[in-house]
Structures are given as structure tokens and as C-alpha cells.
Image (spheres, rainbow, N blue to C red):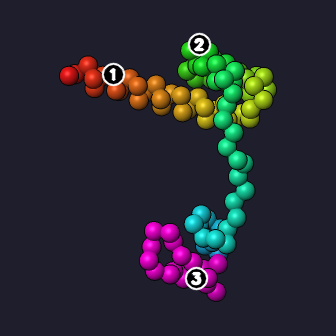
């Protein structure tokens, strides 16, 4: 059995086996529940930044303490640190590029 499914970037309709639908994110038959984005407060950002300045990598215990104190999930704190490390890397690369000129 297959279902007709339209990819947003494709002009053709595709026949997709029903079993394959579980991993396709662009098919309307799959419903994903996702929380609405909530920006961090200035206080949360300040505490995260202070912790980042002390240590770029956070261990589980510190992550748990921080997430409890800031009313964030462990996952949010972990992802924030990953994103912050990438931001730092981007800034360093930009500085190095500008210093060449």
C-alpha cells in the first residue's frame, strides 16, 4: 500500500510506502508535537554566559544545577552551550580573517 505525498521542493507527486512515512518530515500525514519557542530572559542569558566564561564545557552535574536554577531543561542548557561554542568559533574565525587584511 502507498500514499501520495507532495514534497515542498518537488513538482511531482511521489508514491510513498506507508511504512516509510514515519521518518518523512515533509508529509502532511505525520504530526510532530513541538513546543513553541520561548526566548531566554536576560537573567538566564547572563547566568549562562557567566558559566560559559568559567568553563566552555559543562558537566552533567553543573548542567542539572543550572537548568534547575534557571527553570530550563537539561537539553536547553546543553544546546545553548553547543551554540555558544559555535558562536565563539565563528567570532574567532572572523577576527582571524579580518586581521589578514
Q: Residue at x 66, y 23 (%)?
A: 42
- In the rendered image, residue 14 lying in the magenta stretch gets the answer yes
Label ID, residue 54: 2
Say if mark 3 contacts mark 1, CB within 8 Å.
no
Q: What's the distance in space between the residues labelled 2 and 1, CA to CA?
A: 22 Å
Q: Earlier in the sequence, mark 2 or mark 1?
A: 2
Label 1 element class: helix
Residue to which mark 1 is pinned: 95
Residue 64 visible in image:
no
Provide residue 60's location: percent of width, then percent of height. Answer: 70, 27
Q: Quadrant of the N terminus?
A: bottom right
Residue to which mark 3 is pinned: 4
Q: Give 86 or 62, whichever is nearer the viewer.
A: 86
Residue 54, by quadrant, is: top right
The stretch in magenta equals: 1-18
Provide residue 52's location: percent of width, then percent of height. Answer: 58, 19
Residue at the extreme left of the image, as rendered:
101
Q: Is 49 displayed left or right of 69 in the figure?
A: left
Label 2 element class: helix
Provide residue 49's location: percent of width, then percent of height. Answer: 60, 19
Q: Earlier in the sequence, mark 3 or mark 1?
A: 3
Q: Residue at x 59, y 63 (%)?
A: 25
Amino acid at each position: 500500500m502507498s500514499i501520495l505525498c507532495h514534497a515542498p521542493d518537488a513538482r511531482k507527486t511521489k508514491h510513498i510506502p506507508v511504512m516509510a512515512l514515519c521518518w518523512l518530515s515533509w508529509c502532511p500525514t505525520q504530526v510532530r508535537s513541538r513546543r513553541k519557542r520561548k526566548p531566554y530572559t536576560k537573567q538566564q542569558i547572563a547566568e549562562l554566559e557567566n558559566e560559559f566564561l568559567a568553563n566552555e564545557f559543562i558537566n552533567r552535574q553543573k548542567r542539572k544545577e543550572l537548568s534547575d536554577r534557571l527553570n530550563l531543561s537539561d537539553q536547553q542548557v546543553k544546546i545553548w552551550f553547543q551554540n555558544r561554542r559555535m558562536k565563539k568559533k565563528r567570532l574567532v574565525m572572523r577576527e582571524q580573517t579580518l586581521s589578514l587584511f
